[in-house]
Image: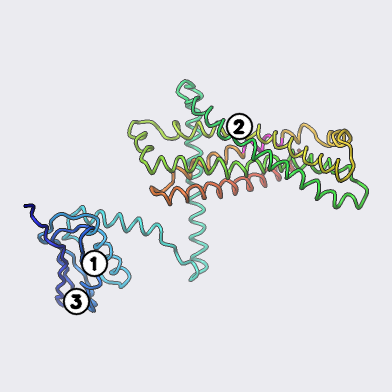
């Protein structure tokens, strides 16, 4: 017959202001364990001392009990001594406390200056992490240029299909509706002055300089950026990235660079495609609502659109592609090792990508104005 394990026990003895808790027996999640509230009772010591005596096999239930005692001591302002516990128990309890502390929401409502300081510190930390990651990608790209045979072209082509060809329907539909909306909005104002033909100018300039690249970037931030973050987050959760690092294969070279290059190359093509669909949407409104022939619409648009406008949109789309790819891959590599962490990483990738697109677009607007483009 197998020996029945001794039940888990926690015996508390109050000696002056010190409550000594002796932990022993076999601690298993499937068996009953002592509760700290019952062990402590109504006693309010100034020091809690944990020690082990006749401790048999134990699992995370013991770690959870120690963590509960330490948390109560912190909240009550009581000293907690755990030096007499085994080192593995203390180490795991410290890791559990650190993990839970990372998820605790900080109350910023008590002090405005504290909230501003914490927010500024968080922004600075994220900016530094983003800059470090961009530096790693730059060094990886330089290494791929020196040794192109080591670059994973097959993965890059597969990603180009996913973020390029597979995104054509949603990008086309979105851009067509944007062009149609711009034409309707412009017609409300221009018809009051008899300038219906200028709808072609509004739609053409808006699509080539702004809306084509911006809408494509936003669509791909929600589609491809989130996919990058989810894929890399699942790899990190499954310890696949750790396996690559153990084998001496940098994750940036193996996973990030093919995705970065694929999205950077496909974004300008999708932006040009979006411009064409947006112009068609405006042309549809012009021919059906404003009774402007398609030929007149096309000729008028050519009078206002120049090579500088087309180049501005292409430059923006290239930049937006890099930003979306970097944001998605960075959030994926920063993902927590849980299913909820993967979801948060995907959400953060979308938010970060859209924010970077808006900031970059504002910078381009100022820069193009200064350069007269």
Q: CA distance from mark 2 to mark 1?
A: 60 Å
Q: Main secondary structure of the magenta part?
A: helix
View extreme (top): residue: 149
The residue identified by callout 2 is: 165
53 vs 149, left or right, is left
Membership of 341 in magenta stretch = no
Q: Secondary structure at mark 1?
A: strand
Query: For this view, does 122 lie left or right of residue 324?
Result: left
Mark 2 or mark 1, earlier in chain: 1
What residue is pinned by disc 3?
17
Residue at the spot 64% in from the left edge and 48% down from the top edge: 358
Q: Nearer the viewer, mark 2 or mark 1?
A: 2
Above or below, 253 against 353 in this view is above
- Mark 3: which secondary structure? loop
| Distance of label 3 from label 1 (alpha carbons) | 12 Å
Q: Which residue is mark 1?
A: 80
Which label number is shown at residue 357? Answer: none
Between disc 2 and disc 3, the foreground one is 2
| Residue at the far bottom in the pictured view | 42
> Where does the image place residue 361, in percent across and percent down from the top left?
66, 45
Where is residue 319? Give x, y as percent.
62, 38
- Nearer to us in this view, 80 or 225: 225
């Amino acid at each position: 017959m197998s020996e029945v394990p001794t039940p888990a026990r926690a015996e508390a003895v109050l000696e002056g202001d010190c409550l000594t808790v002796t932990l022993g027996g076999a601690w298993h999640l499937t068996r009953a364990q002592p509760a700290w509230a019952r062990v402590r009772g109504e006693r309010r010591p100034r020091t809690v001392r944990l020690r082990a005596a006749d401790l048999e096999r134990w699992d995370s239930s013991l770690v959870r009990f120690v963590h509960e005692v330490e948390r109560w001591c912190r909240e009550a302002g009581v000293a907690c001594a755990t030096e007499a516990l085994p080192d593995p128990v203390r180490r795991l309890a410290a890791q559990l406390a650190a993990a839970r502390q990372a998820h605790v929401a900080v109350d910023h409502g008590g002090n405005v200056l504290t909230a501003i300081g914490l927010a500024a510190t968080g922004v600075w930390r994220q900016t530094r992490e983003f800059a470090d990651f961009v530096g790693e990608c730059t060094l990886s790209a330089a290494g791929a240029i020196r040794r192109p045979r080591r670059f994973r072209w097959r993965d890059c082509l597969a990603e180009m299909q996913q973020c390029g060809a597979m995104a054509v329907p949603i990008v086309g539909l979105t851009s067509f509706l944007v062009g149609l909306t711009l034409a309707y909005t412009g017609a409300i104002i221009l018809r009051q002055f008899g300038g219906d033909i200028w709808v072609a100018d509004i739609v053409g300039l808006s699509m080539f300089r702004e809306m084509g690249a911006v809408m494509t970037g936003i669509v791909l931030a929600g589609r491809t950026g989130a996919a990058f973050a989810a894929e890399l987050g699942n790899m990190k959760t499954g310890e696949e990235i750790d396996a690559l690092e153990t084998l001496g294969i940098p994750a940036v070279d193996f996973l990030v660079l093919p995705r970065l290059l694929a999205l950077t190359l496909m974004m300008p093509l999708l932006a040009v495609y979006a411009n064409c669909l947006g112009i068609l949407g405006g042309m549809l409104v012009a021919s059906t609502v404003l009774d402007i022939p398609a030929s007149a619409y096309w000729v008028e648009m050519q009078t206002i659109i120049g090579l500088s406008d087309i180049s501005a949109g292409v430059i923006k789309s290239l930049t937006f592609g890099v930003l979306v790819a970097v944001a998605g891959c960075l959030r994926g590599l920063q993902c927590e090792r849980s299913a909820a962490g993967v979801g948060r990483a995907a959400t953060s990738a979308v938010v970060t990508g859209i924010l970077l697109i808006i900031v970059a677009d504002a910078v381009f607007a100022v820069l193009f104005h200064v350069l007269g483009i």
